[in-house]
Amino acid sequence: MSEASRSLNFIEHIIEDDLSAGFPKKQLRFRFPPEPNGYLHIGHASSICLNFGLGLRYDAPVNLRFDDTNPAKEESEYVEAIKRDVEWLGFQWAEERYASDYFQQLYDWAEQLIRDGKAYVDSQTSEEIAAQKGTPTEAGTESPFRNRSVSENLELFRGMKEGKFAQGEHVLRARIDMASPNMLLRDPVMYRILHRAHHRTNTDWCIYPLYDWTHGESDYIEQVSHSLCTLEFKPHRPLYDWFLDCVTEPDKLRPKQREFARRNLSHTVVSKRKLLELVTGGHVSGWDDPRMPTISGLRRRGCTPEAIRNFADTIGIAKRENVVDVALLDFHMREHLNKVAPRVMAVLDPIKLVITNYPEGQEEWLETENNPEDPEAGTREIPFSRELYIEQEDFREEANRKFFRLKLGGEVRLKSGYIIKAERAVKDDKGRVVEVHCTYDPKSRSGSGTEESMRKVKGTLHWVSASHAIPAEVRLYDRLFTDPTPDQHKDRDFMEFINPDSLEVVQAWLEPGLETAQPSDRFQFQRLGYFCVDPDSTPANLVFNRTVTLRDTWAKIEQKEA
């Protein structure tokens, strides 16, 4: 087997087998068919990357088709959000389609099924229909309306379409087999009455087709060659094919449905219902809250499309469902941001550092690299002065030999600056250290070429000049749930596992060059992590979101708890 062949996933093997069997490559066509009833999440990203990736691999068109058959839950807001997400991920669809584009054709075909004796109007309640379905080991019971005449069925179905009946008064069902071992083939509902305005067709229709009737027929209308669904739709495939048998013509391409496994992400939920519960319950600020697994939330948090695409490539396409550790997504965020994010200095929990032998009122500008991973990123200058801010945790009055940061009597290097030595800690009336007085070696400036500048010390600290630093609100986001699988506990509600420490807001001090940072700009705060400017940010109130830490701190926590 060649290397290229080994790299194919099983979906690509299916396509390659079809091409080898004579399927014309020019007839390959794919689609991504989201329902516009919420925002896309990281699970959808895998499907997006699969379908659009196949389009790129085979130079085939990919449609973006909205499965908009339930006006009770669907909105134009979600349509626009989905389009924005797909484009942001770097993909472009061939055609923008909607299931609602086909309402008339679907209705006409439904009438044909009635004429062919393959569909009938059922006047039972939904509870009565459900009670007659049977069980996996016992056949269902036929509806008393199953053998209505064609003329009566057509008259009732047309009355449904014309709004003559109340919601729930009638449904249209396919007439298949009430004894089928596949319960989905036991006369499934094709249409229901729903007196709700649709986001595109308004009140033109008051009957709406269900997913199983709509999906395969939409694929057929668009001449989609390979209809790729998640694994829960595998039992639906016989119904998909049965409906196609009712409408396909000999000279037209017949779509093929194939299934792949959904990938769940640890420490989160991806059910739209549960995500909506988080939003409406006020547990997050909205669908784009940076703690949400939605693509819009990941984008706001500072994740890059490249990181999501690389994550999707890494987890691949499988036939069995599993839970993917969110740490893998974090890894891809770090890996890409490390290449592209400019380095800057920020202090999140400041303590003042006074260099007592540095001249009062003096300042200088130190040159430093923007990104050592990118030689073309250039350099910038940062101000240095007598009074600086460093992190509280970077100073201890006393510490053992393994503490390589600042301690009394010890030396560290200030990043891109000088070597300093801590001489004295100044405390307030409650005994808390509020200032650290230091001395510096004037000949030790980084890059100055002096012998002192080459002297090695074990610790290097980030800092900002107190007189030049600008304030900013920094939102420190962490995992939304403390449990890896919060929605898989039968005896507990997923809400019980919400992480109370998933958001901490602090005031930080930043180097002054960040004053002009714009929403979505991404940076590495040196020694702290990767951060992104939030859309809430204004020139008068900068707001940064933590995208991801420099290291996986959760791994240490989980090791301690194990």
Image: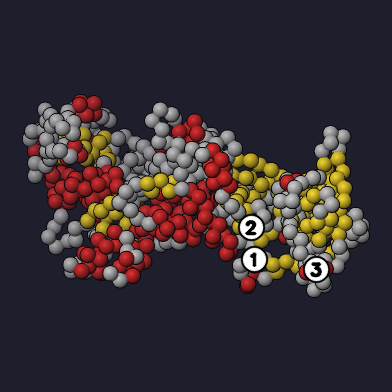
Q: CA distance from mark 1 to mark 3?
A: 21 Å
136 versus 261 height, above or below: above
At label 1, counting other C-alpha atoms closer than 10 Å, the crowd grade (few under 14, some 14-19, many 20 or more) is many
Residue beneath label 2, please? Answer: 524
Q: CA distance from mark 3 to mark 2?
A: 25 Å
Residue 308 is tagged as none
Q: Does dot 3 land on a helix, a strand or a loop? A: helix
- Front position in the image: 325 or 166: 325
24 relative to 114 in the view: left or right: right
86 relative to 410 in the view: left or right: left
Q: Does dot 1 land on a helix, a strand or a loop? A: loop
Residue beneath label 1, please? Answer: 371
Residue beneath label 3, please? Answer: 453
243 relative to 226 in the view: left or right: left
Sequence order check, earlier mark of 1 and 2: 1
Q: Position of residue 397 (x, y in %)?
A: 81, 45
Is label 1 in contact with label 2 (beta carbons under 8 Å)? yes
Sequence order check, earlier mark of 3 and 2: 3
Q: Position of residue 530 (x, y in %)?
A: 61, 54
Sequence order check, earlier mark of 1 and 3: 1
Callout 1 amino acid? Asn
- Front position in the image: 449 or 338: 449
Callout 2 amino acid? Gln
Q: Quadrant of residue 213?
A: top left
Q: Does dot 2 land on a helix, a strand or a loop? A: strand
Which numbered disc, 3 or 2, marks the residue closer to the eye?
3
